[in-house]
Amino acid sequence: MQINTVLPVTLAIIAMTAICALQWWALRRAHRRELIHARARHQAAQQSADTMLQQARRQYAQIQQELIQLRQSLPRSAASLEAARADAAKAEQRSAARSGLLDILDTDQQARRRLPVDGFASTLPSQQFALSSSFDARPPRSLVGERQRA
């Protein structure tokens, strides 16, 4: 009786192994086909991108050459030359005014910076404005009076 059960189990195992091997082979073949198609699409995309890049580079070089030719062919008008002279004159006036101001600051005794007598700068707050602290929790007097009236 044992021989009768061993034979069908062995045949079932062989059949399952054959089915698994056949399925693995079919899926592997399908995957490889998809991989070949994906590689071909990628190659085509790279090639088209490369041709577009080369074309863009040629167009850019052509535009640069045209721009150079146009700049060389443009005559300098009298108005543009006059504007350039006016700009140069303004720049000269600005530099003269700046150097004059620097001369005044160098020669004026009160405008010169000098060290404090004891060598240390004053770190006290300025007495020019009323002291106010951002940490002061008291509201302004105008608001206090309004609260009391209400």
Image (tube, helix red, strand yellow):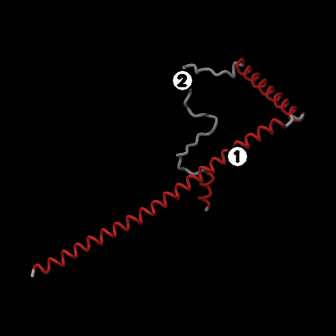
Secondary-structure class at tag 1: helix
Res. 59 mark: 1
The answer to which of marks 1 and 2 sits earlier in the sequence is: 1
Q: Nearer the viewer, residue 1 or 83?
A: 1
Q: Nearer the viewer, residue 107 or 38?
A: 38
Q: Is residue 126 left or right of residue 18?
A: right
Local crowd size for mark 1, using a 10 Å CA cut-off: few (<14), some (14–19), many (≥20)? few
The three-letter code of the residue at mark 1 reads: Gln
Secondary-structure class at tag 2: loop
Mark 1 in CB contact with mark 2 (< 8 angstroms): no
Q: Nearer the viewer, residue 85 or 98?
A: 85
Disc 2 target residue: 120
Q: Is residue 4 left or right of residue 51?
A: left
Residue most extreme to the right: 78
Relative image position of residue 130 (x, y in whole percent) = 62, 39
Local crowd size for mark 2, using a 10 Å CA cut-off: few (<14), some (14–19), many (≥20)? few
Residue most extreme to the left: 1
Relative image position of residue 113 (x, y in whole percent) = 64, 22
The three-letter code of the residue at mark 2 reads: Phe
Up-down relation of residue 43 to residue 75 (above or below): below
Res. 91 mark: none
